[in-house]
Every structure is written in structure tokens, then in C-alpha cells.
Image (spheres, helix red, strand yellow):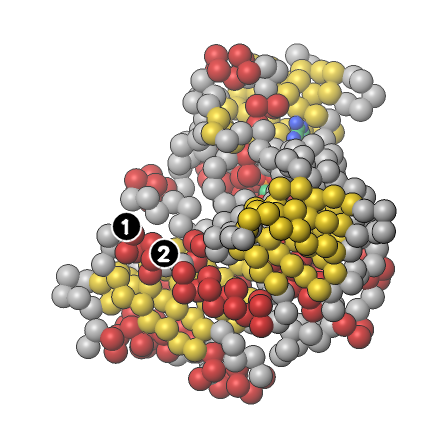
């Protein structure tokens, strides 16, 4: 064993960055093993390149504002520059914090040691009192885990969403998007705004079913009104390429097996999870007491696996695959290792109440954005929680009318009090241009235990979309008067 640390973290994406920063502030000696450049899927494959791309679209009132001025090569250059700058910032910050950065592939060889293999074939073992697995869905610099039944990637034509900006050099006339999750829909909306004819295939019967039927349908309608064909309940069974340059997708829908053609296909179903690969053998993981569920490490509310010295955070564990969830996990793990789980048992209480995971916001940036958090009216009904909803339409909001963006709404879900009045906010679904920002206010209100009266009496600046929140709360109060 060449060196030993208090904590060795595998992976320096959002979860690893937050865990490392938190642990250093707790006074721990921390090493990070990262096989690629710092930043994880978020910086190299997901959030950041997509944010640069979407920002350049400058979605207008009709969601088609970008086409004339859009220059893909220049946007790709902006993406690279942003990534380089952020990598440098992360490296500098790691040095400032005294984090030991080790470049290589990590494999757990015991509950207290990690083997690091480097590209030149060298191997060494480092010791750790605690190991934090923050390895996401795989190494950021590889394509492992992309494989999907019936779909073989073909560079530039059948492209994984993670590799879109590496492989696609011009805006295609038509595109098939396989997978109607966040990145699939963001890409579909972006391409649509650039004039691409887009068809989205989603195996589930509805897009974003967790947002509840009403919000999900309204959002889908809006996408279709923009000209995006949404085939929900359609399972793609194969994607093939023809000699004439077309891509053909075979899918099973309501009418049986059908086909659809386009210039390219983007596979946005995500990588497979396989955290077993991080252990020297399956037997070792089993003997250590580490369990897996669908390839992800099973952890408790503090991020501890079945082995007392091994923790996990972010995409490597169950829960929504978002950078913000990964960062929150990383902070929680470092606090738990330091011996003071965050929030004095708040995590435990929320986990027991089944609330954990419900307070992670979902945001889809499609010009008119879609954000949701907590319970929908359908969730409340299914879980037997007495609730009332309040809704406000953007068509009656001054800012929406003034800027011609009237298609959305805000719906707030309140738990009913014993005297059947709208009590604490337990969920929100918002469809409007700044929904990703507004949903943060909703989550804050939820965590602070704000009720309908508080939301109704809050003074919102005029004219803004935030006024939708006050209107929706007043609507809920009116319903129960
Ligand atoms: C196309 C796309 C768009 C997305 N858009 C958004 C978005 O808008 N908002 C959002 O919140 N989330 C988004 N995500 C999801 C987000 O990127 C992930 O949820 C987040 O990066 C997970 O963080 P993590 O730290 O758990 O894992 P990762 O970011 O995957 O980081 C894991 C790190 O571990 C390293 N690693 C893996 N195995 C090893 C090993 N054996 N040895 C050493 N290092 C290893 C990897 O190289 C990587 O750097 C998007 C994802 C994709 C693919």
C-alpha cells in the first residue's frame, strides 16, 4: 500500500466534488480517483453542454426564434471553451482544498483499499478508512453501458444523447429521439426550434408520468402544438441504417409493429447502471455486504452501503439521475462520515415518511419550461393523502400576455387540514418559460412548511410569471371556502 487517506472517493462528478469538498471542510485527508477529467457526466456529457446549446437557441414566444442566427460549429466551440474553463476551475479548487487527485481507474479490493490502474498499465493500491463510490453510470471518457437491445451506435447517425455534441456536426432535417426523459425532450425541443422534424418515442404510456396526468398531458400537448410528434407507449425494438443515408426505427405501438424514418436517431435512454464493475469481484462485494438493485448500490439515508466503510452517492445509487441530486447526496455522505448527519435526523424522518426523493426538482428546459416537485394530485390520491389543488393559467398572467407566452400554468398541491382547508404545500407542477427557477421557490416553500395562505399572501413582483404561484394558492383557497 503506497498511501492511505481518511476518505478515498471514486469519481469527481457532482457527487464526488460535493463529497470531497464537504469532507475536507470536516478536516479529513481526502483522495479522489478519477479516470477522466474532473466534472463527470454533468460537465462532459450532460448538463453543461446542453445548457450552452439551449442558451444559444434564445427561445422566443413561438419557440422558433433561433433558426436564422444559429451556428452549430460556433456553439460547439463555446461548449468546448466552457468545459475547458470549468475543468481548470475544478482542478484549481481541488488544489486549494488540498484534495489529492489521482488519475486512473479505481477498483475496490477490500473495505479499506482501492486499486488504481493507469493507462500505461501501472497499478497501485491506496488505503482508505472510508470509500465513497461516486462513479455515476460509468467512466465519463468511455462508452461502456451504452448498449441497448436492438440499437447499435453508428457515429453521427445513431447517436447516444451523451455523444450528440461529439458526433453531430450539422442540424439534421429530421430526427428520431428514442426516450422521452429530460435529455431526450430537451434535445427534441431544441432541434424542433432549429427546423428539424422530430419524432420522440417513449415506451411509457405518458411523458413524465410522475408529474401527474394533467401536467403531463398539457406538456405533451404543448410539444405537439410546436410540431414535435410524441409517440408515447411506443417501444423501440431496433434502429437500423440504410445505404441511402436514412435511419429506420422499428417500434411496437398501439397498432402493432411500425417503422419510422429520419436522417438521424438520438438514443436518450441513458447508460445502464453497473456498479458491480467497481469491485474486484462479485464475491468480494457480497462478502463485504454491499447489495445492488438494478446495478446501483443500495444505501441507507446517509449513503452508507451494507459495508460500514463503503458509502455511495449520486447516480451510483437509486433515485433520479440529476446533478443536483448527486451533489446533495455527496454533501450528505461527507456529513454522515464526519459523524453528524445533516438536519438532526431530518433525512431519517423524511425517508421514513416516504418523502425522500420527492423533494428533488425535475426541470425540462424547452423554451416554455416544465418543472415539477413533490406530489401531484394523482400521487396524493394514490397515497390516500387528502389534498386540494389550485391552478393558475398563464393566459391570465400579465407578463405571459405581454410577451406572448401564454401556453402554461402553475398547479400547486396542498394537504388538506383536519378542517378541510388547504394546509402545507406538498407538490407543484409549473409550465412556463422560467419554470426551472420557479420550482425552486415551490420546493423552498414545501420544506419551510408554507401553507396556501402564506403563498397567497406573499407579494410577487409584477409583471412576472411568479405571480402564477400566488394565483394558484388563491385558487385552492377559493375551492375550499
Ligand atoms: C445528456 C445528458 C443530459 C443531462 N442533463 C442534466 C441536467 O440538465 N440537469 C441535471 O441535473 N442532470 C443532468 N444530467 C444527469 C447528470 O449529468 C448526472 O445525474 C450527474 O452527472 C451524476 O453525477 P454523479 O457524480 O453521480 O456521476 P457522474 O457525473 O457520472 O460522475 C462520475 C465520475 O466517476 C468517474 N468514474 C466512473 N467510474 C470510475 C472508476 N472506476 N474509476 C475512476 N473514476 C470513475 C467518471 O469518469 C465520472 O467523472 C444529464 C445527463 C446526460 C447524460
Of the 4 image quadrants, the one containing the C terminus is: bottom left
**Does dot 2 land on a helix, a strand or a loop?**
loop
Residue 401 visible in image: yes
In the rendered view, would you say 159 is above or below 77?
A: above
In the rendered view, would you say 142 is above or below 424?
A: above
Question: Image quadrant of residue 215?
Answer: bottom left
Q: What is the residue that sits farthest to the left in this orientation?
A: 419
Locate residue 182, reporting x and y percent: 57, 54
Residue 446 visible in image: no
Image-based side of 192 in relation to 446, left or right: right
In the rendered view, would you say 160 is above or below 303?
A: below
| Mark sitting on residue 435 | none
| Mark sitting on residue 383 | 1
Label 2 – label 1 distance at C-alpha: 10 Å
Work out whether residue 206 or residue 239 is closer to the camera in this orientation and state it: 239
Q: Mark 2 or mark 1, which has the lower sequence index?
A: 2
Locate residue 447, reporting x and y percent: 36, 56
Q: Residue at x 40, y 32 (%)?
A: 300
**Residue matched to label 2:** 375
Amino acid at each position: 500500500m503506497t498511501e492511505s487517506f481518511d476518505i478515498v472517493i471514486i469519481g469527481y462528478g457532482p457527487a464526488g466534488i460535493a463529497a470531497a469538498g464537504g469532507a475536507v471542510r470536516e478536516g479529513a485527508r481526502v483522495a479522489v480517483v478519477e479516470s477522466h477529467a474532473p466534472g463527470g457526466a454533468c460537465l462532459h456529457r450532460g448538463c453543461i453542454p446542453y445548457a450552452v446549446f439551449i442558451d444559444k437557441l434564445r427561445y422566443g414566444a413561438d419557440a422558433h426564434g433561433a433558426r436564422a442566427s444559429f451556428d452549430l460549429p460556433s456553439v460547439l466551440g463555446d461548449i468546448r471553451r466552457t468545459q475547458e474553463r470549468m475543468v481548470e476551475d475544478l482542478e484549481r479548487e481541488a488544489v486549494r482544498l488540498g484534495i489529492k487527485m489521482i488519475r486512473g481507474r479505481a477498483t475496490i479490493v477490500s473495505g479499506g483499499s482501492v486499486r488504481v490502474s493507469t493507462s500505461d498499465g501501472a497499478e497501485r493500491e491506496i488505503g482508505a478508512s472510508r470509500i465513497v463510490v461516486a462513479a455515476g453510470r460509468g467512466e465519463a471518457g468511455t462508452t461502456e453501458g451504452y448498449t441497448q437491445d436492438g440499437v447499435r451506435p453508428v457515429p453521427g447517425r445513431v447517436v447516444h444523447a451523451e455523444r450528440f455534441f461529439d458526433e453531430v456536426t450539422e442540424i439534421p432535417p429530421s430526427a428520431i429521439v428514442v426516450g422521452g426523459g429530460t435529455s431526450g425532450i430537451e434535445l427534441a425541443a431544441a432541434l424542433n426550434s432549429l427546423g428539424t422534424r422530430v419524432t420522440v418515442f417513449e415506451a411509457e404510456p405518458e411523458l413524465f408520468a410522475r408529474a401527474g396526468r394533467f401536467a403531463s398531458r398539457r406538456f405533451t400537448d404543448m410539444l405537439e402544438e410546436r410540431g414535435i410528434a410524441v409517440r408515447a407507449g411506443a417501444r423501440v425494438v431496433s434502429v437500423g441504417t440504410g445505404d441511402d443515408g436514412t435511419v429506420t426505427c422499428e417500434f411496437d405501438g398501439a397498432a402493432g409493429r411500425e417503422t419510422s424514418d429520419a436522417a438521424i436517431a438520438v438514443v436518450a435512454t441513458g447508460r445502464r447502471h453497473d456498479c458491480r464493475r467497481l469491485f474486484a469481484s462479485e464475491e468480494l462485494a457480497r462478502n463485504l455486504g454491499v447489495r445492488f438493485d438494478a446495478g446501483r448500490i443500495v444505501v441507507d439515508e446517509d449513503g452508507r452501503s451494507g459495508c460500514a466503510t463503503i458509502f455511495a452517492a449520486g447516480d451510483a445509487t437509486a433515485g433520479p439521475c440529476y446533478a443536483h441530486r448527486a451533489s446533495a447526496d455527496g454533501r450528505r455522505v461527507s456529513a454522515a462520515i464526519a459523524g453528524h448527519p445533516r438536519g438532526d435526523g431530518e433525512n431519517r424522518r423524511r425517508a421514513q415518511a416516504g418523502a425522500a426523493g420527492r423533494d428533488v426538482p425535475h426541470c425540462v428546459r424547452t423554451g416554455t419550461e416544465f418543472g415539477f416537485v413533490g406530489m401531484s394530485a394523482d400521487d396524493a390520491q394514490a397515497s390516500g393523502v387528502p389534498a386540494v389543488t389550485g391552478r393558475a393559467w398563464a393566459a391570465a398572467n400579465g407578463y405571459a400576455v405581454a410577451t406572448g407566452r401564454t401556453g402554461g400554468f402553475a398547479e400547486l398541491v396542498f394537504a388538506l387540514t383536519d378542517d378541510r382547508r388547504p394546509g402545507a404545500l406538498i407538490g407543484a407542477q409549473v409550465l412556463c418559460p422560467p419554470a426551472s427557477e420557479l420550482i425552486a421557490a415551490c420546493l423552498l416553500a414545501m420544506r419551510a412548511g408554507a401553507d396556501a395562505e402564506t403563498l397567497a399572501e406573499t407579494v410577487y413582483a409584477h409583471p412576472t410569471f411568479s405571480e402564477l404561484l400566488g394565483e394558484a394558492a388563491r385558487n385552492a383557497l377559493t375551492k375550499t371556502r
